[in-house]
Amino acid sequence: MTEAKDLLYTSISKPLIEAGYYVLSPNLLMDMLKAESAYDSELFIDGDMKMFNKILGADAIVFSVIDEWAKKGVGIQTTIRYVIKSAYTNDIIFDRRCELYLNLAVNSSSGSALGALLDLAMTAINTASTDHIVAARKCNYIIFDDIPRGKYSPDYMKDMDIKSGPKNIKASVK
């Protein structure tokens, strides 16, 4: 599960940056937290966020909690909860859960028995060789797709009439 946390942690900043937020370097923060023996986000999620504002100048802290991360069938199943907390008030300002199945099945639709056998072999190879980072990236983009645009986005303050999606998202993607 440590590898899953690392993959998710290092991939979470891109959709936030693209949404117009300034994000501190995940690798730099990970090294800093590891040096302080404070690597697991679970140690902080219920704590006081004000120290992150004081030490790092952060406005908000993003937490991701992995509930499930496994190869299943012909794909990868991930269930991740994302929480953003204010570094000023400790309030939860964003809380969503993504249950994503990354379907890696290959279907050439040739219709023949040989084609079906080749599809099965290719699906097995595809499932074995696909890195979990692909599922993490897809989950991140699904979760942050409709987050309000940050001040570095040209759409900042122009998206106030757009309603956010559901709190719990279930998706199956290729």
Image: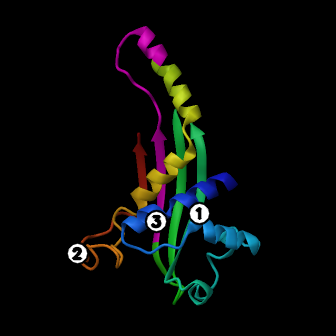
Q: CA distance from mark 1 to mark 3?
A: 10 Å
**Element carrying mark 2:** loop
Q: Which residue is mark 3?
A: 96
| Residue 73 appears in the rendering | no
| Region of the chain picked out in magenta, as a range | 95-118
Label 2 crowd bin: few (<14), some (14–19), many (20+), radius 10 Å: few
Question: Is-magenta flag for residue 117?
Answer: yes
In-image side of 15 versus 48 (left or right): left
Residue situated in front as seen by the camera: 154 or 39: 154
**Element carrying mark 3:** strand
Residue type (three-letter) at the residue carrying disc 1: Val
Label 3 crowd bin: few (<14), some (14–19), many (20+), radius 10 Å: some
Q: Which residue is mark 2?
A: 161
The image position of residue 32, as x and y in percent, is 68, 73
Kindly identify the residue that appears in the image at 68 percent across and 68 percent down: 31
Examine the rendered structure and indicate whether residue 9 appears above or below residue 24. Answer: above
Kindly identify the residue that appears in the image at 62 percent across and 53 percent down: 4
- Whichever of labels 1 and 3 marks the residue nearer the N terminus, that label is 1
